[in-house]
Image: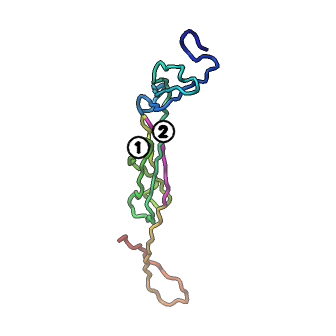
Amino acid sequence: SATGDHGVVSGDLVGCTASNGHFADAEAGSGKSVSADVSLDGTAKDDYRLTSATAWTSADVDKASSTTTVSCSAGPFVYNGNAQTPCSASVTGAGGLSQALTVNYSGNLHAGTATASASYAGDANHEGSNDSQSFTIAKRDVTASISAADKTYDGSDAADITGCSLESAT
């Protein structure tokens, strides 16, 4: 209600419109100062004068999400005695967040399922995120060779195997 020379008189159609709102800065935080340009509207607006063309309040800027992505090149990946590292990782987010991340591997030395993972801890303006991808390391083919002892005919097809060896990797 209006008291003295201040406030809107009961029954008058007058309001305000705010535009050009801005936080004091773009960083995430609590209780941050916000300003906006204000103007009068309504049929009785010409009977009023704003005490300031700018109004102030406070509000929070919450951290934005981030997205971590792990990408692995197409296989096939075959066991070769070395750790397989076919993946890369990056994080993206609001405000231009875009950077490469370190990929951590598990199970990537031997044949079977391996996992590549990456994490982003977050920063002052972004929440943390993580991702992982699996890839398969196939068993390596190998050919066996045997040697057998000669024998005198005895009516049996049994053979005395004297050795077995595998080809070396090339």
For the point 41% across and 58% down, the residue is 86
Residue for badge 1: 97
Residue 61: x, y in percent? 48, 32
Label 1 neighbour load within 10 Å: few <14, some 14-19, many 20+: few
Query: What's the magenta region?
Result: 125-135
Residue 114: x, y in percent? 48, 56
Q: Is residue 1 above or below residue 77?
A: above
Of residues 60 and 68, the one nearer the viewer is 60
For the point 44% across and 82% down, the residue is 149
Q: Is residue 133 magenta?
A: yes
Q: How is the image coloured?
A: rainbow
Q: What amino acid is labelled 2 in the image?
A: Ala
Residue 90: x, y in percent? 42, 49
How many discs mark residues in the rendered view?
A: 2
Residue for badge 2: 64
Dot 1 lies on which element? strand
Q: In this view, does 153 lie above or below 95?
A: below
Q: What amino acid is labelled 1 in the image?
A: Leu
Dot 2 lies on which element? loop
User: What is the magenta segment's predominant secondary structure?
Assistant: strand
